[in-house]
Image (spheres, rainbow, N blue to C red):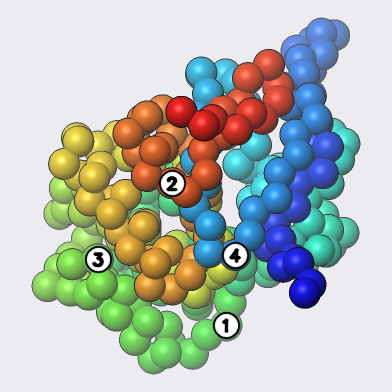
Amino acid sequence: MNSPVPLLRILDMHKSFYDRKRRIDVLKGVNLEVFAGETVSIMGVSGSGKTTFLQIIGSLDRPTSGDVLFREESIFGRSTNALSSFRNANIGFVFQFHHLLMEFDLVENVMFPAIIAGTPGKEAQSRALGLLRDVGLSDKSANKPSELSGGEQQKVAVARALVMSPPMVLADEPTGNLDSHSGEAIMGLLLEFNRALGITVIIVTHNESFAKMMSRRYRIRDGLLFENLG
């Protein structure tokens, strides 16, 4: 029987930055395999490299050395335009700050990635309306983000991350700006979409209880990734 192929394979990832003439090694050889439909949490102290790690696997940054394979193909072996198209089609992002477009209504915000990808307007709108219904905001679809609470704005961000039906969602402290009730609602949505659609979810968080909701848990320490069995 053949072993399943990982959705994501991280190979000896290193990342260094330079502060004037001093080199700062943030990631020092990270390896990880993630399979389709898994949920993974990454924890670590501030400055440990959690966000850097997530940005690299999301193709928003490049490693100093090592590679990231998506379905066994290097994500960095693409031109800039091809990499942008790959990212838009395959990875949904949820950040601590929702990054919604305040001048547009909720439907327009959610459908934006689909419009960028060339999806016909009516289809993109239909997808957006369906996702706003799924996150419990169908009655506010014509509202502007400024008319929503912080938790509701983050629900819109989750809907936007899913409008292209990506196989993977990366969430960087998605509850960090929310109260506990709103944070639980966002985590519930991510897990619900994971169960219903088989979407792989990788989350960076400081919240131990939210991290424990994931099927696999890791910590970044001293530039390396360690499985957290606690």
Amino acid carrying mark 4 in the image:
Ala
Q: Mark 1: which secondary structure?
A: loop
Pick the quarter of the image with the N terminus: bottom right
Amino acid carrying mark 3 in the image:
Val
Q: Earlier in the sequence, mark 2 or mark 4?
A: 4
Query: Looking at the image, is 202 positioned above or below residue 128?
Result: above
Q: Which mark is residue 118?
A: 1
Amino acid carrying mark 2 in the image:
Met
Q: Residue at x 26, y 72 (%)?
A: 134
* Label 2: how many Cα within 10 Å (few below 14, some 14–19, many 20+): some
Q: Which residue is mark 3?
A: 135
Q: Which mark is residue 36?
A: 4
Q: Are marks 1 and 3 in contact (CB under 8 Å)?
A: no
Q: Which-is-in-front pick, marks 1 and 2?
A: 2
Q: Residue at x 63, y 42 (%)?
A: 55
Q: Earlier in the sequence, mark 1 or mark 3?
A: 1
Q: Mark 3: which secondary structure?
A: loop
* Among the 4 quarters of the image, the one containing residue 36: bottom right
Query: Looking at the image, is 152 positioned above or below residue 7?
Result: above
Image check: 126 left or right of 72?
Answer: left
Q: Mark 2: which secondary structure?
A: loop
Image check: 96 left or right of 75?
Answer: left
Q: Which-is-in-front pick, marks 2 and 3?
A: 2
Residue 59: tell me if it is visible: no
* Among the 4 quarters of the image, the one containing residue 72: bottom right
Q: Which-is-in-front pick, marks 4 and 1?
A: 4
Image check: 78 left or right of 123?
Answer: right
